[in-house]
Image (cartoon, rainbow, N blue to C red):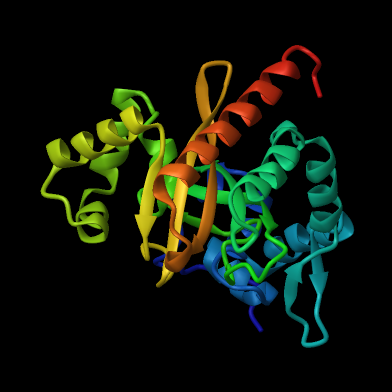
Amino acid sequence: MEDSAKHVSSNTDPGIRTRNRTLHILQLFERRTLWTVEEIAAEMGVSISSAYRDVKELSNLGFLALSARSEYMLGPAFIRYDLLMRLGDPLLKAASEPMLALLSRTTQHAVALISRRFRDQVMCVHQVKGTDHPPSSTYERGVALPMFKGATSKAILAHLGDRALKQLYLNNEQAIRESVGLGGWKDFAKQMKAIREAGVACTDSEVAQGRVGIAAPVFWEGQVVAGVSLVFELKQFDEAGFATEVRRCAREISAALESVKGRGT
């Protein structure tokens, strides 16, 4: 096996040589779960020996682990850091009790979710399931959706600044048109304004068939940082009552976040 990689993969970012290669290696695992050193070298456009050194460093730190088939997977260090995030994330601390209360005030046939913006996506960071046969949900911690799909996404989107909102629209115009069936920027901006004025976003079967989502924005220091949502089946729909409670839950989480201001925790 030759210890060289003269031909850079067509998928390789031309700026990769000036970036942190180990970080780029970890980002490869967003595409699939197992990689050989040879495959990593080809994707990175570097020699196998260089890729091996990077992989060895990541393995020593616990960020990668070797499988029985000599392929690499994400390692146990991520489990450790996920625990530290759960213990230290102010959003999770602020949201846990209000989310339980939201289910108590609405229906235990539902799932309460809290999600934050991640790049041009919205990522679930915590979910609480009702105690009475809640609907199945694949939108668990770590799952990301496009920024313009689903009630939580739209509740966050609607409260972005005008410049950020328009830039996001321009970056994803074709996907937004296909997803939400709007004619252009003016229609999209009009929909976002209506959500902002209502204080909630509501979607029906947009993420999963037969599932209704109602979401409201969560603020911290005047900026939208997350969205809290209630997901349930259509037959349990009580738009006015549930929307009121989702807005209340979002206000409670926002107030709890403000109480940690300046603590550094």
Residue 8: percent from the left, percent from the top?
46, 65
* Residue under the image location 56 percent in, 50 percent down: 123
- Return the residue nearer the eye: 69 or 149: 149
- Return the residue nearer the eye: 158 or 70: 158
Judge whether residue 243 can be spotted in this image. yes
* Residue under the image location 62 percent in, 69 percent down: 40
> Along the horizontal axis of the image, is 191 left or right of 51?
left
> Along the horizontal axis of the image, is 15 left or right of 19?
left
Residue 244: percent from the left, percent from the top?
48, 37
> Along the horizontal axis of the image, is 164 left or right of 129?
left
- Return the residue nearer the eye: 218 or 59: 218
The quarter of the picture where the C terminus appears is top right
* Residue under the image location 40 percent in, 72 percent down: 209
- Above or below 83: residue 204: below
Q: Quarter of the image holding residue 60? A: bottom right
Spot the residue most to the bottom.
69
* Residue under the image location 74 percent in, 42 percent down: 96
Q: Quarter of the image holding residue 237? A: bottom left
The quarter of the picture where the N terminus appears is bottom right
Q: Quarter of the image holding residue 174? A: bottom left
- Above or below 262: residue 16: below
